Amino acid sequence: MITLPPSERDLHAYVDGQLNEADRATMDTYLAANPALLQRLRGWQQDAHSLRAGLSGDLHRMPNPQLDPSAIRRRIAQQRTRRIATAAVLLVAVSVGGAGGWQARNMSIGHANPPMADAVQAYRLFAGNAEMASDWSATKTRDVQGWLDTHFARANRLPDLASAGFKPVSGRLTTTEQGPAAMVVYRDEQGRTLSFYIRPPGELNKLLPRGSRRDGDLQADYWSGAGYNYAVVGPADDPAAQAARRAF
């Protein structure tokens, strides 16, 4: 039950419609005798009405399932799962890409440094010029094997191509990053030449299985043994050179 004069609490209860019928009737009687207070309460009621009208859209809006706490938690979990999955895919892609890139690098190095490429280049530089390949010469000594053994201990023996008409005529020492290399030039009676090349293995010139490859008009037959790489280089399509290759 309210008391008179009404308290602030009673006035707010009246404005908010929270009084019972008896208290409301008592308040109406009191306000009729106090028009100033009645005017103030009507202002309060107007303010309350305006506030309710302004909020009516939000207060009566349908619930948004996207704002439901459980939905929010599920969405966060899904986003976390997607991030983890994306990170995993990126990791795999980087791993595969890295492996593929490394393999491509190795293939590129392999193409840029084919087996015994320096043997082919040495043939092009020296095989046709006996004066340039003059560290050893058949006119000085016949012991070309002894000359090689001086620089390449325990290496495989020099190929004997005499059955195909080719004999050693000159030799030249060269150098590589791994140590000395050498080329021995063979010539037949018609002046055709072949070369035997020996070098230590290296990062880009590892020990090789027996094989052959063509480089322009030249063919390099290569192999490894006793810790060295070897190659015989000569014209690819010359029948005499082909016969010599069958001799070693």
Image: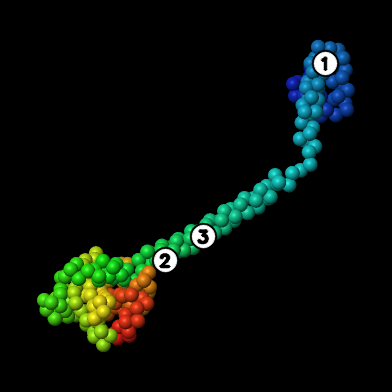
**Up/down of 42 relative to 85, above or below:** above
Disc on res. 38:
1
Q: Amino acid at mark 2?
A: Met
Q: Residue at x 15, y 78 (%)?
A: 138
User: Label 2: few (<14), some or many (≥20) within 10 Å?
Assistant: few
Q: Nearer the viewer, residue 140 or 113?
A: 140
Q: Earlier in the sequence, mark 3 or mark 2?
A: 3
3 or 1: mark nearer the eye: 3
In the picture, measured across the screen, residue 220 lies left or right of residue 81, that is left
In the picture, measured across the screen, residue 102 lies left or right of residue 27, that is left
Name the outermost residue toward the front. Answer: 190
Q: How many marks?
A: 3
Distance Cα–Cα, label 1 vs label 2: 96 Å
Q: Quadrant of residue 143?
A: bottom left
Q: Amino acid at mark 1?
A: Leu
The residue that label 2 is drawn on is 107
The residue that label 3 is drawn on is 93
Q: How is the image coloured?
A: rainbow
Name the outermost residue toward the bottom. Answer: 163
